[in-house]
Amino acid sequence: MSFHAQSPERPRSVGATMRPSQPAASLAVRAPLGLAAAVAVALIVLAGGYGYHRDELYFLEAGRHLAWAYADQGPLTPLLAHLMETLSPGSLTVLRVPSALMAGGTVFVAGLTAFEFGAARRAQLIAASCAAVASVVVVVGHLLSTTTFDLLAWSLVTWIVAHVIRTGDQRLWLVAGVVAGLALLNKPLIVFLLVALGVGMVVVGPRGLLRSGWLWAGLVVAVLLWSPWLIWQSRHGWPQLDVSSSIAAGGSASSQPPWALLPFQFLLVSPVLAPVWIAGLVALLRRRQLRKFRLFAVAWIALVVVFLATGGKPYYLAGTFPVLLAAGAMQTDGWLRRGSPRRRATLLWSMVILSGLVSATIALPLLPATDAGVVIAMNGEVGETIGWPELTRTVAGVYHRAGAGAVIFTANYGEAGAVDRYGRALSLPSAYSGHNAFGYWGPPPDRRGAVVTVGLDSSQLSHFRGCHLAARINNSAGVDNDENGEPVEQCAGTRGAWSRIWPKLRHLG
């Protein structure tokens, strides 16, 4: 099944630099769409393995406190979590369906972008295939995460830019504005992409894009959609800036030193498929056929420089890979036509299959939790999906010894989210925490009574009195994750009213 590109009307406002062009190849739909569907189905089938990720527990709790913004994110992912939980309460599989669908969408968009570059049908399939087996797509497609929507949104924006460049249809800037605006309601990271694309337009063109009223109208749409988040942040002192500073300083569990940014890029797709996206980057810079799309290469370089300078997480560049794979697939398709085509095709598809097997192994719950240690060494996010029910049972044992009316206070949102998710069946009250949005939901009532603390360090514990170690967190799988070995303390009370010590207990990161 294929469709041939039709030449739309020439734009009136951008001049000769933006003449519509038409790729020689037809748009491949059936194979890339089937591949995208296969990825989504596989992710849904395996979605229920292990357990909730700490971030998912947090999103579920944030979904119970719906707001236009939170200290560390926008409302989109908590809203999705709330909708899925309402649709099927307690179902981990249903919670993760949106992520699986978005991962499949990213795969399909990679093939669409290759078509915009003039790629033949086989090259479009190569682009979609490389995206389908990319470790970052499989990892974030398995979990409900802000990164999953970011990956799809970045892919869609870059595809729309490529489509506008090829066809000259400026009206699509409004669609790009909607996509960007929704992404901004997820988290503000896409601002970096938009600025980088603007830099690319200025440096290498096509500069005529910047004279389009439709482009600026699209930006207005994005800002309007983003405005509730901006208003909330301004009224609360811009806590997102504090979160970003904490991440840059290594305060997040997924933070990495700046030097890790570039090496990590070889893992986001697959080490053995790195030549494909590298070839795409080089082709965007040097190939005459792709000259008008050179802004994507400049944007990628600009993003690398910015994230190196600001301490951004290595996966922040993940959304640029579909466009690099699209360009690289064209070069790979040309390489297949030279030398020994059959041997080269065998090598390529063997590398794709190998990459898919590796990505599935390190991202999906294919092994028993007791054997997941080697996987966790490569992908620490897997460890964050194991042990939460046992953590809650340990807390419950201490709580019931402390007596009814005790307050449960945790060091981070994952621990608090776990108590709220699994604690009702164990007759536990809702947990409190000073971490991120939990800190904004307020302290316990000002009354005297016992406190059960989870995971607190000595500086935090100094705000409580009469504390002794009551238990330590462990899990039967023997997984050494961030919670394993953390202390559970039973305290007689606080050193002052909760309302007075609460500002000292709040923290962002």
Image (spheres, rainbow, N blue to C red):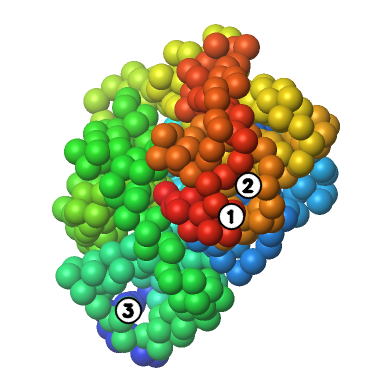
Name above or below for residue 378 compared with residue 87: above
Is tag 2's residue or tag 1's residue first in the polypeptide sequence?
2
Across and down, in percent, residue 199 comes to 23, 69
Residue 189, image x and y in percent?
40, 59
Instruction: Name which residue lies at 40% across and 22% down.
Output: 378
Quick check: can you spot residue 485?
yes
Tell whether 348 sits left or right of 29: left
Sequence-earlier tag: 1 or 3 = 3
Mark 3 or 2, closer to the camera:
2
Answer with left or right where residue 19 lies relative to residue 421: left
On the image, the x and y values in percent for residue 241 come to 37, 63
Q: Which residue is mark 1?
A: 497
Report the residue at 56% width, 76% height from top: 228
Say what amino acid the circle numbered 3 marks: Leu
Q: Secondary structure at mark 2?
A: strand
Estimate how packed mark 1 is, as few (under 14), some (14 to 19) or many (20 or more) residues with alpha carbons within 10 Å: some
- Left or right? Give the position of 62 relative to 228: right
Identify whether 175 is placed above or below 213.
above
Q: In this picture, is 214 found above or below 295? A: below
Identity, as a three-letter code, of the amino acid under mark 2: Tyr
Q: Which residue is mark 3?
A: 209
Closer to us: 45 or 54 = 54
Q: Earlier in the sequence, mark 3 or mark 2?
A: 3
* Left or right side of 119 for 449: right
Q: Foreground: 487 or 342?
A: 487
Given contact means CB atoms under 8 Å apart, are the residues at marks 2 and 1 in contact? no
Q: CA distance from mark 2 to mark 1?
A: 15 Å
Labelled pair 3, 2 in contact (Cβ < 8 Å): no
Q: Which residue is mark 2?
A: 432
